Amino acid sequence: MTTDIRITLAVQKSGRLSEDSLRLLRECGFEFNGGLASSRLRASSSNFPLDLLFLRDDDIPRYLADGVVDVGIVGQNTLVESNGTASECVEVVEELGFARCRLAIAVPRGVEYKSLEDLRGKRIATSHPHILRAYLERLKIDAHIHEISGSVEIAPSLGLAEAICDLVSSGSTLVSNGLKEVERVFDSQAVLAANSSLNEGQRELLDKMLFRVRAVQRARNNKYVLLNAPNEALDRIISTLPGIKSPTVVPLAKAGWSSVHSVMNEDEFWEKIELLREAGAEGILIVPIEKMIV
Ligand code: ATP
Ligand code: MG
């Protein structure tokens, strides 16, 4: 009775992960009757056996560990922070590349800071006490961890702590609170995590979801390239643009010229464009890819 098997996915109800999580689900082709308004607490897909639950991000690891939800989209920081309770029951199945941030230690701008030794015996305010404790223990620094659940940046100015350990992306919040970043503790991004004891049917559903997620991710990281080149430049161009299997080469109406179509990774984009121009390529078009299955 495979038709009865469904999978429940937790996403953050409202916050930094919400928009990108829902966009990923839309790009994967999952449709939801009535849309995905932020006021909803749950939703069921009309074209895949998938139910969504909208939760606070801090609750997602616990729900995953308890098997209340089968999969979830959550920050690595939140997952690792809660791992005291969830580690054996929850596995990361895919890194999603959004909500990138770092957990960093910061001190007031005017304070002279040379090394971690300067934090010995000091109070550090954080909402990530487990990650911070593990980090300090590994580096043998004895400091007092002062756990608070939010607005960590103001702790030093309130006299609550000498330093903070908080999530940073651009660093502008630190600057506007008179703080400077001094140590990088943990790098984070959003991940797809799953309960490790899914049944066979649910595993199959998870694999189907992952297949779509990977096609979307791959498409985001790659571009479709079209260019014209004189035939004598083709060998160099083809070795620069190997594509998925090999590039498509079609003759142009103009004698001695061809059009080359291929796929290129976003990371090597500018470097490759230069090589292509040096080789004699002209009229280079770069087109986004919607889905990519290899
Ligand atoms: P909730 O109400 O769901 O508990 P929250 O206030 O705890 O939300 P958000 O501020 O929405 O959480 O952050 C969610 C996640 O977004 C963080 O746990 C982290 O993984 C990621 N994130 C990315 N950049 C940042 C940043 N600059 N500051 C904080 N979190 C960030
Ligand atoms: Mg939270």
Image (cartoon, rainbow, N blue to C red):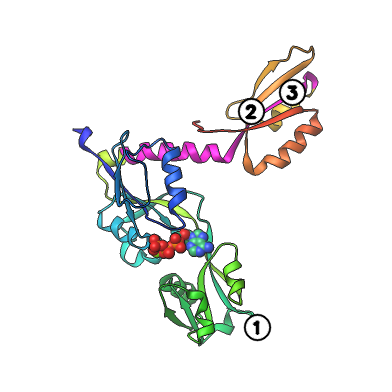
Q: CA distance from mark 1 to mark 3?
A: 58 Å
**Residue at the (75%, 27%) spot, across then down:** 283
Kindly tell me whether mark 2's CB lies below 8 Å from ligand 1.
no
Judge by depth and name the residue closer to the eye, 30 or 203: 30
Residue ID for mark 1:
110
Q: State which region is magenta.
A: 205-232
Residue ID for mark 3:
228
**Residue at the (72%, 37%) spot, across then down:** 272
Image quadrant for the N terminus?
A: top left
> Which numbered disc, 2 or 1, marks the residue that appears first in the sequence?
1
Q: Position of residue 174 (x, y in %)?
A: 58, 71
Residue ID for mark 2:
262
Q: CA distance from mark 2 to mark 1?
A: 53 Å
**Residue at the (52%, 75%) spot, across then down:** 153
Could you tell me the amino acid type at mark 3? Asn
- Marker count (numbered): 3
Could you tell me the amino acid type at mark 2? Ser
